[in-house]
């Protein structure tokens, strides 16, 4: 199982943004024999026993393997997760010059623990829209970029200038204080005098939006000229790599564990459960992983779980195997099952009162089934039983979580898809600490348990579900 953890760490280090995570997922799927589809084209050649995937906006990806015994109307066995994490994203106009410093304007994305972003060695990553000209023909494409070295920092204010911080705590104004420093104006002006006109300095209107120094860094990574940059979607990210750590090497220290840990384990489970020539011989359903963008901000986008992306996939697959009966999709949905996989809150030793005393998920304790009577999680008794039964068959540990009655409960893509599609859903996740920090932590054992449990879900669900009788 050490290979699973090592592969996860590699995945995390290759995925500073949702765009990079999808790109890495594509690489893993193609290496495992999955064929890429396009949503812009007809899906006329889907075949039982084959494996496919498609991307949307290059920040969401859906992969599926069709059972050899699949017929239209059979169910879909899905794991859903998300590719995004709280971060600081560059504004449309980033150029800020203040107090002799070159600064970069950013906006908060999601509910991050923003104080953890101070005094970190930061860089930028994301995608750039580039104008390309070949043989007199102009085209536009996006390129993924990542500046490897630290180029920015958000410095804290010295305690000598903020004497109340010890008694009143750190108070952050997100507009005024979360502004990274790129460089100093005097150093930039001196460089221009020594080197002559800086590339990009004469780019007119574009230069009023961004520091030429920033554009140079982006253009270098995109392997283009500054004036070929049409637009970009970039974010700040930490330069410290993900690692297996702790005195006994029992933890993973990393950014974006929420939710790239579950995204990777889901992909790994799908790949390994379909890895041999005969893996799908007895499968009558479709095994699927759907990784969405924008969960951290509500999922309401064309590539979020609130979009019809997953339902579109179910519809197109069903219709590809039967064009004449439009009611087969409704039948298929009622035979389907969704595991909404999003990281869970482990018991914190320094804040134990934050957990309900009978529901305290612990590191090394296995996946956590999330419950909420007010449907902030989509789990019910039937879906919880199915997921728990799979764990018991493999003798894997399993835990339960309920938020305290005097605390608000977070949510996931589970209720969105359960209500929007009408699919049976269980909400689960691996336990972690420091959720939404720039640097989070989880346990090595739970990564292994997650992979094994999700892989078993794909392999065991069809047979188990045939034994569960509810709406009879």
Image: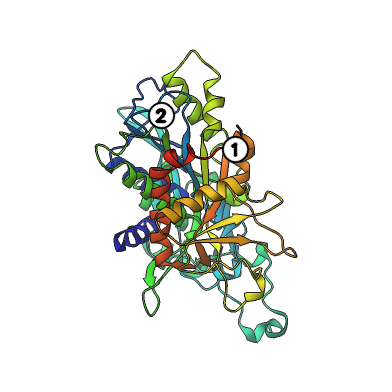
User: Residue 467 placed where, x, y %?
Assistant: 49, 39
Which element type, helix, strand or loop, lies under badge 2? loop
Residue 175 versus residue 467: which sits nearer the camera?
Answer: 467
**For the N terminus, which image quadrant?**
bottom left
- Which callout, 1 or 2, points at the residue further toward the start of the chain? 2
On the image, which quarter does residue 42 sit in? top left
Q: Which mark is drawn over residue 470?
A: 1
Placement of 142 over or under 312, stated as above or below: below
Q: In this view, does 435 lie to the left or right of 151?
A: right
Q: Is residue 56 left or right of residue 156?
A: left
Q: Is residue 261 left or right of residue 400?
A: left
Q: Which mark is drawn over residue 95?
A: none
Q: Residue furthest left?
A: 277
Q: Residue furthest top?
A: 324
Q: Residue 395, can we see it?
A: yes
Q: Which mark is drawn over residue 38?
A: 2
* Residue at image location 69% in from the left, 66% down from the top: 173
Q: How crowded is mark 2: few (under 14 residues within 10 Å), some or many (20 or more)?
A: few
- Give the CA separation, mark 1 to mark 2: 37 Å
Residue 379 versus residue 167: which sits nearer the camera?
Answer: 379
**For the C terminus, which image quadrant?**
top right
Evaluate if marks 1 and 2 touch, with contact meaning CB atoms under 8 Å apart: no
């Amino acid at each position: 199982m050490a290979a699973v953890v090592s592969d996860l760490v590699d995945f995390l280090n290759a995925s500073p943004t949702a765009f990079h995570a999808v790109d890495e997922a594509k690489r893993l799927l193609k290496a495992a024999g999955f064929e890429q589809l396009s949503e812009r084209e007809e899906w006329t050649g889907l075949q039982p026993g084959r494996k496919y995937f498609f991307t949307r906006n290059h920040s969401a990806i859906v992969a599926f393997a069709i059972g050899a015994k699949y017929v239209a109307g059979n169910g879909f066995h899905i794991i859903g997760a998300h590719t995004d994490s709280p971060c600081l994203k560059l504004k449309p106009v980033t150029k800020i010059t203040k107090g002799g410093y070159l600064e970069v304007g950013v906006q908060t994305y999601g509910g991050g623990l923003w104080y953890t972003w101070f005094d970190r060695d930061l860089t930028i990553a994301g995608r750039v829209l580039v104008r390309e000209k070949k043989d007199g023909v102009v085209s536009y494409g996006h390129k993924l970029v990542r500046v490897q070295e630290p180029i920015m920092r958000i410095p804290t204010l010295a305690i000598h200038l903020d004497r109340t911080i010890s008694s009143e705590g750190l108070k952050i104004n997100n507009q005024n204080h979360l502004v990274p420093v790129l460089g100093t104006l005097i150093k930039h002006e001196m460089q221009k005098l020594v080197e002559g006109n800086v590339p990009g300095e004469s780019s007119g209107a574009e230069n009023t939006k961004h520091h030429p120094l920033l554009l140079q860094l982006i253009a270098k990574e995109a392997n283009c000229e500054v004036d070929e940059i049409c637009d970009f979607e970039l974010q700040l990210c930490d330069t410290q790599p993900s690692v297996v750590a702790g005195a006994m090497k029992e933890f993973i220290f990393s950014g974006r564990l929420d939710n790239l840990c579950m995204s990777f384990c889901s992909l790994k489970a799908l790949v390994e459960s379909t890895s041999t020539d005969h893996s799908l011989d007895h499968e009558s359903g479709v095994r699927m992983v759907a990784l969405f963008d924008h969960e951290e901000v509500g999922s309401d986008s064309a590539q979020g779980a609130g979009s019809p992306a997953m339902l579109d996939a179910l519809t197109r697959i069903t219709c590809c195997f039967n064009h004449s009966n439009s009611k087969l999709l409704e039948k298929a949905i009622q035979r389907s099952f969704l595991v909404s996989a999003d990281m869970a809150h482990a018991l914190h030793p320094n804040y134990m009162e934050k957990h309900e005393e009978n529901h305290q998920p612990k590191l090394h304790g296995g996946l956590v089934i999330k419950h909420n009577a007010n449907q902030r999680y989509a789990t019910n008794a039937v879906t919880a039983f199915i997921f728990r039964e799979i764990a018991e068959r493999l003798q894997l540990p399993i835990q339960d979580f309920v938020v305290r009655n005097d605390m608000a409960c977070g949510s996931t893509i589970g209720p969105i898809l359960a209500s929007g599609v009408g699919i049976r859903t269980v909400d689960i996740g691996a336990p972690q600490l420091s959720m939404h920090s720039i640097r989070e932590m989880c346990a090595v054992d739970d990564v292994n348990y997650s992979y094994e449990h999700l892989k078993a879900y794909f392999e065991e669900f069809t047979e188990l579900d045939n034994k569960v009788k509810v709406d009879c």
